[in-house]
Amino acid sequence: MSENIEKPVEFRVMPNGPLHAKGKFSILTPDGKTVEIVDEAFFCRCGQSKNKPFCDGSHRSSNAKL
């Protein structure tokens, strides 16, 4: 019999890039509504993304120092 044991969410800071989150989790709006349930997401750290809180790669063309 195998148990369904979920691993904790893992966060990794990508050098000169986004915050990488991997695992099963929910993303909530400030008022508590679920936006998305994902297995993996990349979050903006430079503040330049047009798709916040997610990274859209804008850090590559900005002068942001991460």
Image: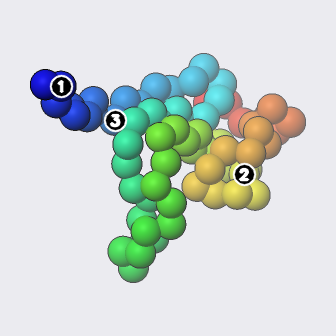
Q: Judge depth for marks 2 and 1 and give the one in front.
A: 1
Q: Which residue is mark 2?
A: 49
| Residue 37 located left or right of residue 45 | left
Residue at left 50%, top 66%?
A: 35
- Density class for disc 3 (Cα within 10 Å; few <14, some 14-19, many ≥20) is few
Quadrant in the rendering for residue 52: bottom right
Q: Which mark is residue 52?
A: none
| Residue 53 located left or right of residue 4 | right
Going from N to C along the chain, the mark reached first, 2 or 1, is: 1
| Three-letter amino acid code of the residue under disc 2 | Ser
Residue at left 49%, top 48%?
A: 38
Q: Which residue is mark 3?
A: 9
Query: Measured from the top left, where is residue 29 in percent x and y?
Result: 45, 70
Going from N to C along the chain, the mark reached first, 3 or 2, is: 3
Residue at left 43%, top 68%?
A: 34
Going from N to C along the chain, the mark reached first, 1 or 3, is: 1
Q: Judge depth for marks 1 and 3 and give the one in front.
A: 1
Q: In front here: 11 or 25?
A: 25
The secondary element bearing badge 3 is classed as loop
User: Dividing the image into 4 quarters, which one contains the N terminus?
Assistant: top left
Q: Which mark is residue 2?
A: 1
